[in-house]
Amino acid sequence: MESTKKVVPGQSQQHPGKSSNPKGKKKKSSLINVLKIALIVMIVVGVIGAAGVYLYITSVLKDIEPIDPDKITNSLTENSVIVDSEGRILEHIQNQGLRTVIKYNDMSKDLINAFVAVEDKTFFEHNGFNFVRLFGAVKDTVLTGKRLGGTSTITQQLARNIYLYEMRSKRDIDRKVKEAYYALELEKYLTKEQIIEGYLNLVYLGSSANGVEAASQAYFSKSASDVNYIEAALLAGIVKSPSIYPPMLTVEKVDVTADDYVIDDSDPLYTLIYNPKCEDRYLTSIYLMHENNKITDAEYEYAKTVDLKTMIHPGKTSQDEITSFFADMVKDEVTEDLIEKYGYTKEEATNLLYTGGLTIESTIDFDMQKTLESHYAIDNFTAYYGESTSVAVKAFQKDNGLSVDGAAGPNTLAKIKELSGMDTSVFTLDAYKKGVNSDEVILLKQALYDLGYLINSEDFPKVTVLLDNQGNIISEESKRLIIYKQSNLIDSSDNFIIPSSDYQFDENGNLVLLKNKRMYFYPHYQDDQLVSIQLVVKETFTYGDNEADNESLASGKYNVTELYTFEGKDVLVPNEYKSFDADNNVVIDKSFLVDQPDFFTIDANQNLLVSKGNYVIADKGVIQPQSAMVIIDYHTGELKALVGGRNITGQRVFNRAINPRQPGSSIKPLSVFTPAIDSGRYTAATVTDDRPVYLLGDPSVRWPLNWYEAYSQYYKHWGLVTLRESVQWSINVTAALIAQDLGVDTSLEYLQKFGISTLVTSGSTSDANIAAVALGGMTKGVTPLDLTNAYGAIANKGVLNDVITYKTVKNSKGEILLQNESKQTYVVDENVAYIVQDMMKTSVEAGVATPAKLSANNDIISVAGKTGTTSSNIDAWFIGYTPYYVGGVWFGNDVNIPLDQGSRIAAQFWKTVMSEVHADLEPKQFEVPSGIVTATIDIISGKLPSELSALDPRGTVRSEIFLRGTEPTEVDDVHVMADICTESGKLATANCPTTLVESRLFVKRPVPYNPEENLDSRGNPILLKDSQYDLPTEECDIHTEAQTTEEPTTESYTGVKPTVRLVDGTLFVQRPYPILLSDGSTLVLSVGSKINLDGSVTLSSGDIITAESISDIPNYSTEELDAMNIAP
């Protein structure tokens, strides 16, 4: 490297070798004159240019804020905070493992040397500004037109981070001038040590780590005081682009490929992988450290050979007082809004969020959030040490560097005592493990709960599993294997088991893995060429083996309290050794097996055992069933509380509240009932016939089915029901018929207006069908957040407020950077919304959603809502609201395994949480808008009641609400009177004896229904629940000849059946019939009397004998009464 001599302006220079020889003087004089003229011109131009530069700099710095020396130290340590709606701190962003301040004297000298060598090698020599670098950068900008860059010293970077953070995305001369000013000022007030300390505490180094201390913990699990020169070089290499060059990346498990080097797979949903892009920057760092004499030749040569993958040891995620679901959403929304408003890159917005000293006023209600979370972590524990406790202990052991075996031995108990204060003096056993039943286990569980490792499952449904003879979970319908029991895939020595039936060796000695067995084969193509094959171990499960927790239902079928699923990952075979054969089996080349003799062994049963280290499977199970709940203030759109999963800790975890699931019937109010009322063609009183329908187009396939079909031995359909009753009892057939009538496009339009963001409206598989819009069988499903907020639009008088997670973002000076207000969308008129709301209120008061009532009569704080259950109880929902808040609950499994019950438990959970949320709120009812009127109707016809309507024993005359102008004007015409022959149960003819003719009230169904034309799967006629009220269509076929006598004689009763059962279940007496009264006397019932279902008797005169007055009503045969020969 050439040395240069520094020239000091204004200092006379000695020119060695100056000659006094006058020879050639004349020839040189012309050149000297030219140079003089040029010099004069340059001086003039320089003066003019300097004046211009001075004026420019003066204008740029005219309004610049001067440095306050007293604020510099505070500025270096400012952090962003998220507060709740009352100003209480939800999260110190830097305190969540994101930035920890470390003093200069505590920093590793290798660390300081690395950053100085890479970022600013003259740092300790310059006065805050590198004129040479700036001149070069300006020259390049002028000549190339590119953005100004590459000129900042460490002092300038610190100045930018403190004073010009909001200008970071601008790379212009204005910013550089300001940077230079602040850099020079900083150099006045701070020592070099203070400057480098501030810089290294503020610099963003990827993985949400701000500052070298946080980064050292994140990547190496050590303090910045302990990093060596190799680790320091890795960190210094990140600065150029923290989103590109960090040594590890966090990715979703589904995105991990066979080529990725997995660093940590312990999280159930995310994986840490090595980032090979860090290597070039690392090599640059160690080169510059060597070039600047910060490391020796030997250290440099060694550093070039280091396997960086072995250097990465990520630190554990710290646990917050509450889960991070809400805070993560706040950070995401703030980041997106900063990018949109200020044009930041994602990296710049993230840096501002974590290091800008922002105060973010979130919408969270901290007390409400803690209330919600308390119900996801109830600590009511038993004395049994089961699977859930074992899983919790394993997680604790792993996080604390202990031997991981799931048993609480001396070392584990000691560590738990250290961290929780648990009293171990009462513990009597050397170790506690699965199967132990002891009171000490309760103390252990409480400590694990306090540390965030264990929860109770009392308020949650169970998982219903059908097991095959090997203990794997299989489908009840198809008997197809769903998920393997873990011990069937992984043996006690942690080998992955491939049975002899799943593999073979071909004639060349290659290993052939057969398809559709214990692994998934994922081909990866590039430009239509196969570039890799990924071998993925299938998912496995474990569950608690405590018989008190697991309920045996039938052979091989159980209700399991806590089931844990483990994500399978890769079988580690390099791509060059894998190929497909003609049958799509995977062939592993023999050469790999020769090179890697420890890859597998074969046991005595010819099972192929892949040894640990050659495959990957998650070591932490995810508890099932899972759940999510959302609470929103629908008046403002402010999210108040949210939990996205059970037993979840850490940050950036899978949030089930914002991931879609099938909504089942909970979609109906949005896609069917609201558009029906809004159309003006339907009212709450509109009657639809719940009868067998065949809407799939196949006349032999009855669809849809109703949920109550599985619970009713007799009735699969209920017959004529109003729209209110359809909502109240969640009747699928009527919802589907209405959706078909309205049109699928109409339903989709309303779902879009309600803010459902996951709709698929076109393509070969879409939501443009009745199953999707009427019954919730959607392509992607709906997120709990979207669905809950959509119900909020009904509650908010038909106006949808977009969900927001924060209100304002202020910088460290208190200036507002972001003001967040919910965007409003008009969905429907408030009167339409009220009708739908009132129907859902009925469902809560006296329908399928009654467990959600906050008071016995739903009259203190009103609740309206709707349940939802998908086929086989895969998903269970309740979405409900009060005059204050809307809340939504989802239960389900991450794999498609049924729950032991449907939406009832979701409604119960909703009530449990919302009762506490509303505990201190004033009683309040829903307000009735001015466009609502009331009318009396008959619910069988949906029309105004007639005289006959009041005679219906079901009490069909009701009060109903309507949109003004939609009240019925026609009178009930479905109730009719008809004469019935009580013996045949058919229409009476002139031949029927008058004593057997009864005038009765019937319903004349608008469209006749014939059960014989609608058969179930066993060939039996399908009766409707209200069929007993149907007007018969056939005449009596018993009395076919005219009667000779009007009144029967004693002898005329011979052979007459004693009674005949009417359609309402009562027995009609056809001949004198003796019964025994309670006082011991005998009463002979006359013809026309009725024996009622409750044991009472209605005499032919109309008088009633109560059941208490009757001792016995014998069941006489015809022959017995013939022998008694009782006179009329």
Image (spheres, rainbow, N blue to C red):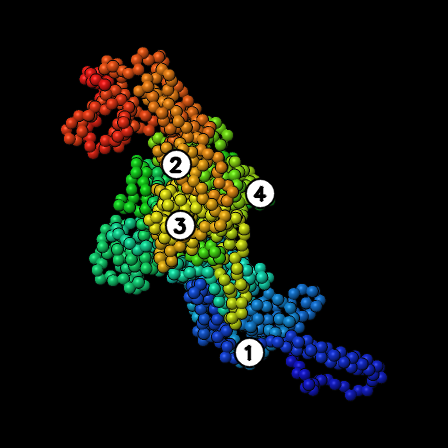
Viewed as shown, does residue 827 lie left or right of 852? right
Q: Nearer the viewer, residue 230 or 394?
A: 394
**On the rendered image, what quadrant is the N terminus found in?**
bottom right
Q: Nearer the viewer, residue 414 or 1059?
A: 1059
Task: Give residue 965's mark.
Answer: none
Q: The residue tagged with tag 1: helix, strand or loop?
A: loop
Look at the image and tell me whether residue 556 can be seen: yes
Q: The residue tagged with tag 3: helix, strand or loop?
A: loop
Q: Which residue is mark 2?
A: 956
Q: Check the image and name the residue furthest to the left.
A: 1080
Q: Looking at the picture, does residue 548 appear above or below residue 1020? A: below
- Kindly report which numbered mark, 1 or 3, lies closer to the viewer in this rendering: 3
Query: The disc labelled 4 sits on which kind of residue?
Result: Gln
Q: Earlier in the sequence, mark 1 or mark 2?
A: 1
Residue at x 34%, y 45% (from the top left corner): 462
Q: Which residue is mark 3?
A: 863
Task: Give residue 67's mark.
Answer: 1
Query: The disc labelled 1 sits on which kind of residue?
Result: Ile
Residue at x 59%, y 71% (from the top left corner): 152
Q: Earlier in the sequence, mark 1 or mark 3?
A: 1
Q: Check the image and name the residue furthest to the right.
A: 26
- Kindly report which numbered mark, 4 or 3, lies closer to the viewer in this rendering: 3
Q: Earlier in the sequence, mark 2 or mark 4?
A: 4
Give the percent coordinates (x, y) of residue 278: 53, 60
Report how far apart the C-alphas of labels 1 and 2 lie in the structure: 81 Å
Report how far apart the C-alphas of labels 4 and 3 lie in the structure: 58 Å
